[in-house]
Image (spheres, rainbow, N blue to C red):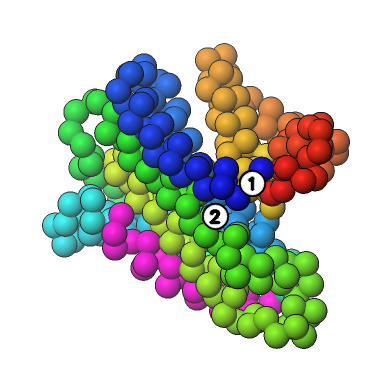
Amino acid sequence: MTRYAHHTAPLIFSLSGFVLAAIGVKPSLADLLIMSAYYLLLAGSWNLLAGFGGQYSFAHVGLATAGAYGTAVLIHAFGLPGWSGFILMPPVIALLGGGLGLVALRVRGVQLPLITFAFAGAFAVFLAAAADLTGGSMGMQLPKLVEGFDRSPYLVIAGFLVALLFLVQNLVIDGRIGLFMQSIRDNEDVAHGMGVNIFGVKITAFMITAALAGLAGTFYANYVGVLAPSMLSMGEMGFVVAMVVIGGLGHRYGPLVGVAIIRTIEYFVRGFGAEYTLVIITGIALLVVLFFREGVIAHAKSLLPHNTTRWKS
């Protein structure tokens, strides 16, 4: 796919939100699409960090949760509207991501996933224990961004946020920073020997992807209206990773495909036994790892003629 075609994706998604809002969709389908946008922000930003940057951080859902609870603080403590979270929380969470980037500079291999997983776990414990501040396991309520039961405004917002994700992704992947990230992913020592600023690239990658995760958390807080430590469950991060792996780790549209597959499964399985959702998704992930190691999208590309010249990442 040409670079021009990649750069039409943000326009397509921004328009799709208006189209869906205009034609109207039933509430259950609207909920599916809106929450799919939340997961796509998480999966897409994690793919940018891990798939293109080689930094396997398991703190991504924790960063989104920080964005969600940070939005709650803006509303309850400072009396700001929910809209303020979309502006203020991404830079704040980006700084938090920069801190994780400093950790990434000092560790390699399995140490980074373990440290970032510990960060997410510790944050979940804090949210549950600090009941006076966070509501604990009972949760914290927020006023919804748009009063009433109309999902149309959220469909428009979701379309804009997904468009922003692809815009940022294109700018990163097609720019110098994306080239440097992939060189570090492939061989950090060689990249350093070629003059790549390892410190700057890793910090930048963590900050960009953390900002997107914080944006996802703000969107979640404003749409759902109820926050609880369950946002940080191991299953949530597992879902995000599964979405990327199933779709295609390190592929531009891998998260989009993965989110579409998993959310569609959730939508239909919910009717006869939601408890089987995790089992089914785990089974699909195992099949993909065994038979389509680069994900569904990579396998689909391999079936197309002249895929090596027309369908580059």
Q: Position of residue 279 (x, y in %)?
A: 69, 30
**Residue 229 as seen in the image, left or right of residue 300:** left
Extent of the magenta region = 86-107
Whether residue 204 is in magenta: the answer is no
Res 257 quadrant in image: top right
Q: Earlier in the sequence, mark 2 or mark 1?
A: 1
Q: Which residue is mark 2?
A: 170
- Per the rendering, the mark at residue 2 is 1
What kind of residue is marked 2? Asn
Disc number lying in front (2 or 1): 1
Taking depth in this image into account, of 206 and 5 the one nearest to the observer is 5
Q: Position of residue 122 (x, y in %)?
A: 50, 63
Residue at position x 28%, y 56% in the image: 85
Q: Quadrant of the N terminus?
A: top right
- Per the rendering, the mark at residue 288 is none
Q: Position of residue 208 (x, y in %)?
A: 49, 64
What kind of residue is marked 1? Thr
Label 2–label 1 contact, CB within 8 A = no
From mark 2 to mark 1, how far is it between C-alphas? Answer: 12 Å
Residue at position x 45%, y 28% in the image: 32
Residue at position x 36%, y 16% in the image: 26
